[in-house]
Amino acid sequence: MVNAALIGGEQSGKTTLAAKLGKKGTESDIVLYNFVKGDNILAVIDPVGYPKSPKPLVNAANMSDVIVFCIDAKGLDARAGECIIMLDLLKPKHGLITITKSDTSNPYAIDELKNKIRLMTKGTVLESWEVLPTSTKTFENIDRLKDILFDLDNKLKEENKALNDKPARVAIDHHFNVTGVGTVILGYVRQGTIHVKEKIKVWPIQQEAEIRSIQMNDVDVKEAPTGSRVGLALKNVQSKDLDRGHILSVKEEVGDELALNCVTAKFKGEFKPGDKVHVYAGLQSTPGNIVKILENGKEVESTKSAGKYVVHLKTDKEVAYTTGDLFLISRLEDPKQRFLASGTV
Ligand SMILES: Nc1nc2c(ncn2[C@@H]2O[C@H](COP(=O)(O)OP(=O)(O)OP(=O)(O)O)[C@@H](O)[C@H]2O)c(=O)[nH]1
Ligand SMILES: [Mg+2]
């Protein structure tokens, strides 16, 4: 199974492309599309609530194995720039760039745009990503895009094998109550393997729950390995007590005071103690405050872009995490580029 997030600026063709890649499923501020071909399952994630809020964008990126970065054949807008900054802070392992609506352009202009993209992404995580022109009108490269994603699916099955024996961690992205079934969550197995009848805790609320049943693509299964998108029926926990981002796991750290080893955004990465920010950890998100900033062990009055700092934060809600998890900090006001920094505990 491969989970692909469509990331890109306004009107860059994300939703139209998603609908060509799969069949619409779960719908909220992120919309999922599914496509099954033999042993391969593709889930496409469209962050429809972006750019109004950065949250769906961050969530989609953090729910995915691969980023499909959509750039309109007309060129990049300010939001595309914001997306590049976010991706460069999150450093996803896999990604590719698609120049959408290729039917509205010509080969000469597309080559020009490719060069421009190369310049704009130089020194960022996107630098080495393949650039593929696509059109949902002429279907140019739509099958090629699917093939690339399915090839990655096969590669991920190998990559994830090493993670299957680790303690299970499932990030919840949706939760609801189903009559006759009880609490159902939708989520992503980030590591380990989950089994039916397994007892597992919900973090950060530290509620013991039992996995009553597991579904993958509407099919009942007994277990689900790393990388699976699952629907779980849970015993002993109510949907109203859950939140997007809660983690099913044996053990997580929980806290609202964090000291993060951060890198700041390459552009508009300035902030200072006292600033109100928004903090993302996996699919969790909470408002917070910058408490203190250290550079080389010394307190400083503000950050600069593209710097390294230890940032002390106080979050409004407790967050659950494991050492190594990547946090993302964004600002609340919108100067077109809202991502400030990323860091680990
Ligand atoms: N000619 C042409 N038009 C396209 C293509 N894909 C999308 N469009 C048009 O481009 C516009 C934007 O497409 P969407 O799929 O809504 O783009 P989006 O990124 O989801 O937009 P927002 O969610 O509003 O930011 C729509 O009017 C589409 O009909 C394409 O391959 N060719
Ligand atoms: Mg859309």
Image (cartoon, rainbow, N blue to C red):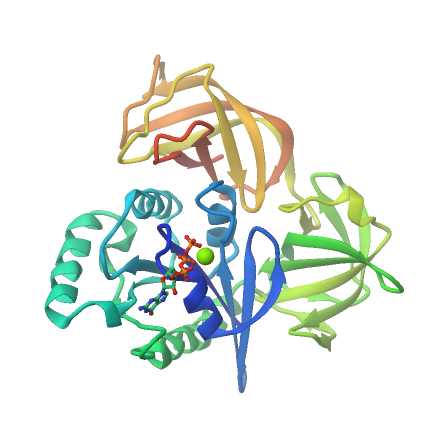
Looking at the rendering, which quadrant does residue 216 occupy?
Answer: bottom right
Ligand 1, image quadrant it occupies: bottom left
Can residue 202 be seen? yes
Left or right of 329 on screen, residue 140: left
Picture coordinates of residue 106, whole percent (x, y): 15, 70
User: x and y percent of residue 276 in the render?
Assistant: 49, 21
Q: Nearer the viewer, residue 219 or 48?
A: 48
- Across and down, in percent, residue 39 comes to 54, 84
User: Measuring 47% from the left and 14% from the top, which residue is drawn there?
Assistant: 274
Residue appearing at x 48%, y 26% in the figure? 277
104 in relation to 154, above or below: above
Residue 249, image x, y percentages: 68, 51
Residue in the image at 79% along x and 49% along y: 239
Front-most of residues 240 and 199: 240
Identify the residue at horizontal 74%, vertical 63% (top origin): 232
Is residue 251 shown left or right of residue 123?
Answer: right
In screen coordinates, is 299 left or right of 123? Answer: right
Q: In the image as oriented, which residue stretches furthest toward the right? A: 180
